[in-house]
Image (spheres, coloured by chain):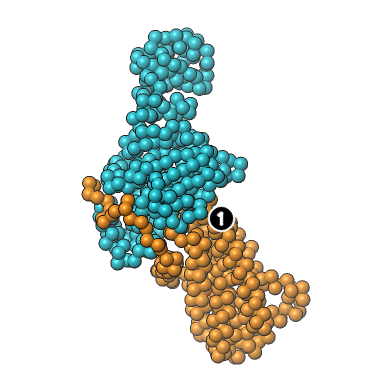
């Protein structure tokens, strides 16, 4: 190996050209999408298995056995979408973060990119948003297929569906950033049983918020759960006939939640990235 | 901003909570120089590299890379440096070539420009046949070469290598040394850490000896060796600690200096190994037996032992 290691190098003389942050951001995003595409099947299985199983039991079997009325499917569908969206957004950020910072240190090549460290975190969150939306888009037609025609389902408020999907994914992707960088790797299992599971079951995904009138304490307690707003927002946009929170309340709540988690996630990422 | 030495560090101190990683360290690295930090694990070498590569914030003091401050101008610094980590950390979701192309893209270099360069680097580092392989299919030495290629893809001015040959077999280590010599020949600035004496001695223009967060010596290998205490270091391990043996040993012919560190007796001799037999005799006369003997010629190692009171393992 006596040949020159650098092909066309003049390292001493060259002043580095100014790198545009936007082009680095796009390169980072391209990397995450390339990896997501390679692992698409596993990604979808990992993030949509739980909601799909729920869908089969509660959206198909129980109504067929007449344990649940047809109307339940209408209330369930938006919730299932909310779960798929949130679960995949949170996982597609939290899991790689735990791995990268915990043991593989793979993210270090991106932390050396000549951009502010926060940009690397922001890109991860945005990639999580996209993956959340992909998961929801995957589940919607399957749900329609499993449950058959769903009374009162309307796709005429497309803009509102997209808005809720974006805000919901952003909130949960940011939450994933926070959890993934703040939680010790050995506690990742705990994250699912202590944080994610209660969030799913008390997230008004499997029943409308108004239904909690029967247990008023719980009705107000669940308001701290961001999943509630995604579920209710999806109801407002997809099945407006089912009782739901007003869309503007949902949007405001999600913006507040997303900004809060974004700030916490950014801070926590920076703390892990820069010692 | 591109002026001054490649690296300029002034009164750098880093604390992790209560623990002091290193304090008040100052040094400069000239352009084109190969500069080595030599010291045991935990001496603060990796933390120093962490600060110089913008990944660790200094508690106080300043560090400039080609005139850019590592804290306030981190983005500029990152553009000027390439980093080879202690443990290879390639992006395992990407193949070998993609690792290089994406890394270049993170530096704003379009694929059209980075592809030929990536291919040339893989060729010259001897891993061209792995271009489309998964990273996991490479050996440790090959992954380390990929890390070097990655550190070079964006044409950095200063290359940092943190213990680049730890865990590599001797043959791979020699070929990495060869790569570093070629890079040096091209006029690149190289800053590396190592705890191998031989590596520092053979590769570096100047060596900083560090231990417990202090910069103890800084000079060329030749000058450092001259500064090593005279004579051969004879290290004798006794069956039990016995400081009393120092007195008779110091009186022996050919003994320049003798010190006891627990059961280990360090004797500097100007008569080579010929002092061994009388030293053993002296120890046995006082009721201790000798369990181990080790000889070291005057070297960076004897200097290190003399300065720190311990060996560099």
| Image location (x, y in percent) of residue A7 | 26, 55
- Is A30 located above or below residue A210 in the figure? above
Question: Residue A29 appears in which quarter of the rendering?
Answer: bottom left
| Image location (x, y in percent) of residue B276 | 38, 15
Mark 1 lies on residue: A271
Q: Nearer the viewer, residue A252 or A179?
A: A252
Q: Nearer the viewer, residue A96 or A202?
A: A96
- Is B183 located above or below residue A65 in the figure? above
Which chain has been coloured cyan in this picture? B
Q: Secondary structure at mark 1?
A: helix
Question: Residue B136 appears in which quarter of the rendering?
Answer: bottom left
| Image location (x, y in percent) of residue B141 | 33, 48
Q: Residue at x 32, y 53 (%)?
A: A13
Q: Nearer the viewer, residue B228 or B7?
A: B7
Which chain has been coloured orange in this picture? A
Q: Give me the chain letter of mark 1.
A: A
| Image location (x, y in percent) of residue B288 | 49, 14
Q: Nearer the viewer, residue A73 or B97?
A: B97
Q: Is residue A33 visible?
A: yes
């Amino acid at each position: 190996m006596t040949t020159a290691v650098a092909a066309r190098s003049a390292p001493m003389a060259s002043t580095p050209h100014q790198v545009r942050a936007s082009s680095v951001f796009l390169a980072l995003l391209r990397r995450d999408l390339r990896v997501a595409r390679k692992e698409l099947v596993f990604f979808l299985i990992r993030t949509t298995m739980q909601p799909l199983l729920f869908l089969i039991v509660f959206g198909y079997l129980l109504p067929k056995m007449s344990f649940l009325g047809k109307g339940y499917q209408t209330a369930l569908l938006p919730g299932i979408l909310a779960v798929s969206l949130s679960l995949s957004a949170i996982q597609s950020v939290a899991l790689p973060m735990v791995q990268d910072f915990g043991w593989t240190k793979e993210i270090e090549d991106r932390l050396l990119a000549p951009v502010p460290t926060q940009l690397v975190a922001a890109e991860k969150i945005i990639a999580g948003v996209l993956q959340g939306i992909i998961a929801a888009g995957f589940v919607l037609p399957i749900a329609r297929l499993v449950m058959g025609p769903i009374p009162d389902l309307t796709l005429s408020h497309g803009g509102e569906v997209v808005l809720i999907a974006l805000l919901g994914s952003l909130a949960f992707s940011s939450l994933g950033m926070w959890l993934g960088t703040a939680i010790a790797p050995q506690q990742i299992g705990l994250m699912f049983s202590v944080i994610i599971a209660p969030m799913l079951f008390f997230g008004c995904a499997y029943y409308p918020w108004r239904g909690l009138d029967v247990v008023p304490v719980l009705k107000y307690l669940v308001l701290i759960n961001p999943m509630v707003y995604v579920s209710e927002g999806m109801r407002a946009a997809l099945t407006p006939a089912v009782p739901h929170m007003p869309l503007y309340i949902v949007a405001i709540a999600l913006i507040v939640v997303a900004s809060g988690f974004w700030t916490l996630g950014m801070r926590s990422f920076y703390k892990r990235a820069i010692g | 901003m591109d002026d001054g030495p490649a690296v300029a560090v002034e009164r750098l101190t880093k604390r992790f909570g209560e623990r002091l990683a290193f304090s008040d360290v100052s040094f400069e690295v000239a352009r084109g120089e190969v500069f080595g930090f030599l010291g045991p694990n935990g001496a603060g070498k990796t933390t120093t590299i962490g600060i110089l590569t913008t990944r660790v914030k200094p508690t106080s003091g300043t560090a400039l890379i080609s005139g850019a401050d590592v804290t306030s101008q981190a983005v500029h610094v990152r553009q000027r440096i390439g980093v080879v980590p202690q443990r290879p950390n390639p992006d395992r979701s990407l193949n070998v070539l993609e690792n290089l192309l994406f890394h270049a893209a993170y530096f704003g270099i379009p694929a059209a420009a980075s592809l030929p360069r990536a291919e040339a680097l893989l060729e010259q580092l001897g891993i061209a046949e792995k271009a489309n392989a998964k990273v996991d299919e490479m050996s440790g030495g090959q992954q380390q070469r990929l890390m070097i290629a990655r550190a070079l893809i964006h044409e950095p001015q200063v290359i940092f290598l943190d213990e680049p040959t730890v865990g590599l077999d001797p043959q791979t280590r020699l070929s990495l040394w060869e790569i570093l010599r070629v890079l040096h020949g091209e006029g690149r600035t190289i800053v590396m850490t190592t705890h191998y004496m031989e590596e520092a001695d053979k590769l570096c223009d100047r060596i900083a000896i560090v231990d417990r967060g202090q910069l103890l010596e800084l000079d060329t290998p030749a000058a450092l060796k001259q500064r090593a205490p005279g004579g051969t270091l004879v290290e004798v391990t006794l069956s039990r600690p016995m400081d009393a043996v120092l007195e008779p040993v110091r009186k022996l012919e050919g003994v320049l200096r003798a010190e006891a560190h627990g059961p280990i007796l360090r004797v500097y001799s100007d008569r080579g190994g010929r002092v061994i037999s009388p030293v053993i005799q002296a120890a046995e006369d006082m009721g201790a037996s000798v369990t181990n003997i080790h000889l070291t010629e005057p070297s960076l190692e004897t200097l290190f032992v003399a300065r720190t009171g311990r060996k560099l393992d």
